[in-house]
Image: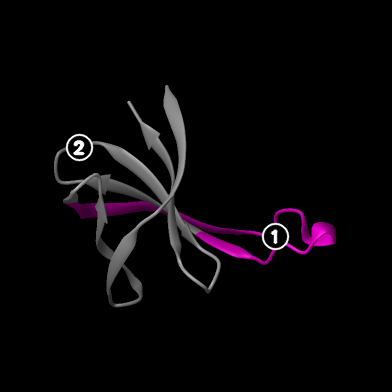
Amino acid sequence: MSKLVLEPVLVVMDRQKPARFFWGKRWVYAEKITDRWRATGQWWAGETEKTFFRIQSREGRLYEIYTDGKGWRLYRVYD
């Protein structure tokens, strides 16, 4: 099961991939990037392309974050 979050996060990159992000008053450290993809979204409504990363944290939880080139957002958290 997963939960949509859609909150801004601060991301620290390492070699063009997220190394950690700040959410919920703590740092979440990436153990592994399990997937990466791009989505255009509703381009006809002016949405820009987004780059998504699915991250497995050191604690074993899965998160999805994305950037649209302007900032980062936590998209989804898996239980």
Which element is circle 2 on?
loop
Residue found 68% across the figure and 66% down from its top: 48
Q: Residue 36's spot in the image, x, y percent? A: 46, 57
Residue 29 occupies which quadrant of the picture? bottom left
In the rendered image, residue 34 lying in the magenta stretch gets the answer yes
Quadrant housing the C terminus: top left
Residue 63 occupies which quadrant of the picture? top left
Left or right: residue 66 compared with residue 47: left
Real-space CA distance between mark 1 and mark 2, rounded to the nearest whole angstrom? 29 Å
Residue found 14% across the figure and 39% down from its top: 59
Q: Residue 64's spot in the image, x, y percent? A: 41, 47
Look at the magenta stretch and give its main secondary structure: strand
Mark 1 belongs to which amino acid?
Thr
- Residue situated in front as seen by the camera: 49 or 17: 49
Residue found 70% across the figure and 60% down from its top: 40
Location of mark 1 (residue)? 40
| On screen, residue 3 above or below 50 | above
Residue 11 occupies which quadrant of the picture? bottom left
Quadrant housing the N terminus: top left
Residue found 47% across the figure and 58% down from its top: 66
Left or right: residue 68 compared with residue 58: right
- Residue situated in front as seen by the camera: 43 or 8: 8
Left or right: residue 10 compared with residue 26: right
- Residue situated in front as seen by the camera: 23 or 58: 23
Residue range (magenta): 27-51
Which element is circle 1 on?
loop
Location of mark 2 (residue)? 60
Mark 2 belongs to which amino acid?
Gly
Q: Residue 55's spot in the image, x, y percent? A: 32, 49
Q: Earlier in the sequence, mark 1 or mark 2?
A: 1
